[in-house]
Image (cartoon, helix red, strand yellow):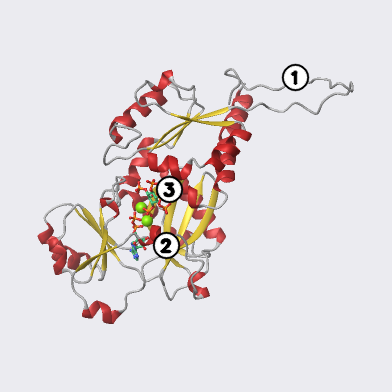
Amino acid sequence: MRLNGEISYRNEEENEMGSVLPPPLPQLKLVVGYALTSKKVKSFLQPKLEGLARKKGILFVAIDHTRPLSEQGPFDIVLHKVRHCCPDSNSQLTGIEWQQILEDYWRKHPEVTVLDPPAAIQHLHNRQSMLEGVADLNLSDCYASAGKVGVPRQLVITKDPSTIPDAVTKAGLTLPLVVKPLVVDGSAKSHELSLAYDRFSLSKLDPPLVLQEFVNHGGVLFKVYIVGEMIKVMRRSSLPDVNKREILNNAGVFQFPRVSSAAASADDVDLDPIIAELPPRPLLERLGRDLRRRLGLRLFNIDMIREHGTRDRYYIIDINYFPGYGKMPGYEHIFTDFLLSLVQSKYKRRLSNS
Ligand SMILES: O=P(O)(O)O[C@@H]1[C@@H](OP(=O)(O)O)[C@H](OP(=O)(O)O)[C@H](O)[C@H](OP(=O)(O)O)[C@H]1OP(=O)(O)O
Ligand SMILES: Nc1ncnc2c1ncn2[C@@H]1O[C@H](COP(=O)(O)OP(=O)(O)O)[C@@H](O)[C@H]1O
Ligand SMILES: [Mg+2]
Ligand SMILES: [Mg+2]
């Protein structure tokens, strides 16, 4: 937050009528350096965000990957999401190289807010470590009054697919199973999921992967977006329920399309109100607060489903770092307020320490 490097207030001036002008306004200038994929720049840095930000004194500046970070800015905040699978037209760096650069920079400039810490983001690049945080929260007990939150039972397979049928039996997993690539690295492949109806077909799969029990949820998914302390939930279309007859009459592994991004919203569809009902606010607030703390992240979303036939049995199936906020109505207000709140609380802390 700076004007020539410092927080500044306009001097009290007299207008031509001789009366004193209103109290001084802080002339805030907040510089946000961003390292984002070209896809993210397009979906997130929309003109309505940049325009509102400018009015509020926030400037978004693209980080130049060919120059040292310390020579750029200076930044108050660094916002980042780079692709870990492969180079992007915005950056030829690998994810690991970027992580190293950012951590070195942060060590030398601890005053900069890095959204979010690379090591914390790393947890979400693996579908096992991603959900460990949720399992650790022991949500089935604490949240009992508002609803129970868990993760579907799952098995991680890292080698020899021929052992999968026995491993599935041993773990007592119930079919059908959702087959997910273990690593989430921003590639299209890491979102290629399948549904397996019988355990023998699983021996043809290509590890490393996660086998997760499919939970019937009435075809509706809840996308819970977190931006700092703000939580917003949106309905999305999801996979339809699978009935017992289908399980008995089907065999094999079937790839399914990216349902949740294909259908932007489930609001227009004629939905059973019990299926459509959003999770209760107190549950989401508690979940958001606990997960923020547990994951050490401020920018993420949660894919949550409610088991069909229950009113309060929820499962978290996916957590995404810096998701598609551009789809969230009013995101430009939410995001600019969040950025300002970060520096304001830092400023207050500095004042109370001085
Ligand atoms: O592109 P979008 O807007 O669909 O955002 C993707 C997210 O969609 P969502 O906001 O949850 O609907 C998407 O969420 P899902 O995994 O589809 O639930 C991912 O976060 C994706 O990032 P990555 O490919 O895993 O690195 C996100 O892709 P990036 O924009 O980060 O490349
Ligand atoms: N355990 C599950 N039970 C039912 N449906 C699931 C389950 N896991 C995933 N799905 C469906 O598959 C979609 C994609 O799975 P997800 O784990 O969110 O992967 P991605 O990171 O590719 O979005 C979900 O949005 C949901 O529709
Ligand atoms: Mg998902
Ligand atoms: Mg995901």
Q: Disc 3 or disc 2, which is closer to the eye?
A: 2
Q: Is residue 185 left or right of residue 304?
A: left
Q: Mark 1 and mark 3: span between their CA atoms?
A: 42 Å
Q: In the rendered structure, which disc, 1 or 3, sits on the residue that comes first in sequence? A: 1
User: Which disc, if any, is residue 323?
Assistant: 3
Coordinates of residue 308 in the picture (x, y in percent)? 42, 73
Q: Is residue 252 visible?
A: yes
Give the mark, 2 or 1, whose residue is nearer the N terminus. 1
Q: Which residue is mark 1?
A: 11
* 161 to 49, vertically: above or below: below
- Count all numbered tags in the image, as a single digit: 3
Disc 2 to disc 1: CB gap under 8 Å: no
Q: Amino acid at mark 2?
A: Ala
Q: Is residue 134 above or below residue 63?
A: below
Q: What residue is disc 2 on? A: 263
The amino acid on which the numbered mark 3 sits, given as a three-letter code, is Pro
In terms of secondary structure, where does tag 3 sit?
loop
Mark 2 near ligand 2 (CB under 8 Å)?
Answer: no
Q: Is 83 on the left-hand or right-hand side of 138?
A: left
**Which image quadrant: the N terminus?**
top right
Q: Residue at x 56, y 59 (%)?
A: 282
- The answer to whether residue 319 is above or below residue 22 is below
User: Which is closer to the viewer, label 2 or label 1?
Assistant: 2
The residue positioned 18% from the left and 74% from the top of the image is 251
Q: Would you call the spot at circle 2 few (<14 residues within 10 Å), some (14-19), or many (20 or more)? A: few
Q: As shown in the figure, which amino acid type bears the numbered disc 1? A: Asn
Q: Where 247 falls versus 15 (above or below)?
A: below
Instruction: Looking at the picture, tell me which residue is in the foreground, 352 or 161.
Output: 161
Q: Find residue 170 and report its horizontal and vertical position in percent.
A: 18, 66
